[in-house]
Image: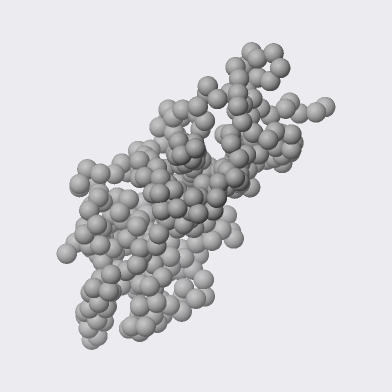
Amino acid sequence: MSVPPHPPDDPSATIQPGAAPPGVTGVVASATDLQTVEALRRGDEAAFVRLVEAYQASMLRLAMLFVQDRAVAEEVVQEAWVGVLRGLDRFEGRSSLKTWIFRILTNGAKTRGQREGRSVPFSLLGDVVLDLEGPSVEPERFLPADHPKEPHHWVSFPRSWDGIPEERLLAQETLSTVRAAIESLPPAQREVITLRDVEGWSSGEVCNVLGISESNQRVLLHRARSKVRRALERYFDEEE
Amino acid sequence: MAAREMTCKELVELITDYLEGALPLAERARFEAHLGRCDGCTNYLDQMRRTIALSGRLTEESIAPRAQEELLDVFQDWKKGRQP
């Protein structure tokens, strides 16, 4: 079984002290993190089970962003846990435990995904790629720049979704629309929106794990959310 | 001097920065001033908020018990390997 490298052995994955502003979640290990690591080093199985329960589902979802096959993703997650255990003695608390675990996971998942030709490494997705994308809303929805009264205002207002009944808004079909929209996003946008909006991570955590700047993260998140909104709008309008 | 009015087309590109608290103060003021008088953008912002909330409702995958058992084996193997 191939085990992904631990962050301390991989300079590109090492979190530089001071890389993110203080107070951002996920930057350094908390007291609880250090206690957990101590317990694991002692071989405390209950501590391991708690960790698995807390992160396994998220790890699997994240792995599936990089590898297509569910069984392969499960393997990647299992290998990441082996990597975590073997790397424990080298954990120095310079990042939160969660960030460290997910870095081990993403390193392994990326390697695997690249081998399968699925994912574009983050380093290749610079601002150039971001700038090539069009606007968040179709330009024809706005009045032209030379409009005498209201340049660049809505031609017709986006509809209020207040009138949509709760059971429709939260229907399985609505959620399927969201899922399909997320799945069709370019990899970097998909990763960011999955971690932020599906998993509920903080922006600091996402930047640390994916190794991107706060501003790049916001651009990716904005593109992603705008496209999902557009898909929902189309879906709700169709149903009228 | 009053800052130039924000347009709807500008506002939709700044929503995530606004929600993330990343807009500079003056931009934030222009953003909110526009929202105060534009129902279209108010609806749009609300749609974005609902979109975010809906993403958060995507089903949680539960761990297959088999995977958990395998992980306990992994843990036990690792533990044995550590003992002198």
At horizontal 65% and vertical 14% (from top left) the residue drawn is A147
Left or right of B46 on screen, residue B72: left
Rendering coords of residue A82 (x, y %):
26, 69
Q: Nearer the viewer, residue A16 or B60?
A: B60
* Residue that lies at the very extreme toward the left in this rendered image: A1
The answer to whether A36 is drawn above or below residue A65 in the figure is below
Can you say which quadrant of the picture contains the N terminus of chain A? bottom left
Figure quadrant of residue A47: bottom left
The answer to whether B30 is drawn above or below residue A29 in the figure is above
Rendering coords of residue A81 (x, y %):
30, 68
Rendering coords of residue A170 (x, y %):
48, 53
The answer to whether B15 is drawn above or below residue A167 in the figure is above
Q: Nearer the viewer, residue A146 or A107?
A: A146
In this figure, which colouring scheme has been used for the structure? one colour
At horizontal 23% and vertical 86% (from top left) the residue drawn is B84
Specify whether residue B54 is in view.
Answer: no
Rendering coords of residue A174 (x, y %):
44, 48
Total numbered circles: 0
